[in-house]
Image (spheres, grey):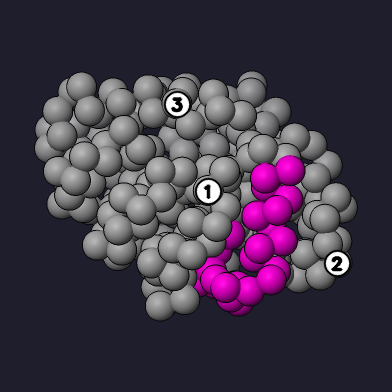
Amino acid sequence: MFDFHVHTGHFKDGLYFSPEEVAQGMKALNVERYYFSSTSTGSVPFVEVRREIEELFSLSEGRAIPFLWVSPEMLKHSPDLSAYFFREFAGIKIHGYHQDWNPAGKELRRVFEIARDKNVPVMFHTGGREASNAGAYMNICREFHDVRIILAHGRPVDECVAVMKECPNVWADTAFMSVKSILRLKEEGLISRVLWGSDFPVMRYFYDIPAEQYYRQNIEEVREAIGNEDFRRITQENFDSIMKLA
């Protein structure tokens, strides 16, 4: 089983997801491979972000595969982001809700040019405000049709469906996605571009149950709703499809 959306780092209200917590949790949940980024980005010096990434990669024995979370300030400091690519990253993460990214701005286009040059996908947080909703990224998804794009959370689902149908280079992950929305993607014939994502262990901030318990319950709910075959697709086969293009 694979997970496309995991985090380590500092979060809201002083909450901290340590590399040790994440590595131990993913191992206990039998997640074979997971893609992660640091929620510390932009709130602490990058040397701390680097430490978290390197520590989680080491503790996970290679199961944890990092995405580089990029902020507008990082791009200003290093226009080609070379100052931050201290290792090979599997992709780039953009969070347009917490950070001020213009979906039609030259800064975001520059990130896409870098992603294209490096042949890595771009993951967008979607939802929370109009400028970070899935539909806000329609134009850039069309323009950079040769870049793989993941609409994390797929919010709102109507806009996510519209972008995915228009742009075959666009995928969605299921982090904090309702079962109803996952079923909608299946009904629209898009299940082959859906990736299991959990946001682990961010659910600790929102729910008064252990993160691992929430994770296991979510697995069973989704598996029951979409069936074993499609559950296998979104938790393994689709990962091979998107990453083998690298």
Q: CA distance from mark 3 to mark 2?
A: 34 Å
Secondary-structure class at tag 3: helix
Q: Earlier in the sequence, mark 3 or mark 1?
A: 1
Camera-nearest label, 3 or 1: 1
Residue 244 percent location from the top left of the image = 54, 24
Report whether 137 appears left or right of 93. left
| Cβ atoms under marks 1 and 2 closer than 8 Å | no
Residue at 44 percent across and 70 percent down: it is 136
Residue 77's label in the rendered image is: 2
The amino acid marked with disc number 3 is Ser
Q: CA distance from mark 1 to mark 2?
A: 27 Å
Query: Label 3 belongs to which residue?
Result: 241
Residue 145's label in the rendered image is: 1
Q: Earlier in the sequence, mark 1 or mark 2?
A: 2
Residue at 79 percent across and 37 percent down: it is 87
**Quarter holding residue 102:** bottom right
Q: Please say whether residue 102 is one of the residues in the magenta stretch.
A: yes
Crowding near pointer 1: few (<14 within 10 Å), some, many (20+)? Answer: some
Secondary-structure class at tag 1: loop
Q: Quadrant of the C terminus?
A: top right
Residue 207 percent location from the top left of the image = 31, 58
Q: Earlier in the sequence, mark 3 or mark 2?
A: 2
**From which residue to which does the magenta span run?**
94-117
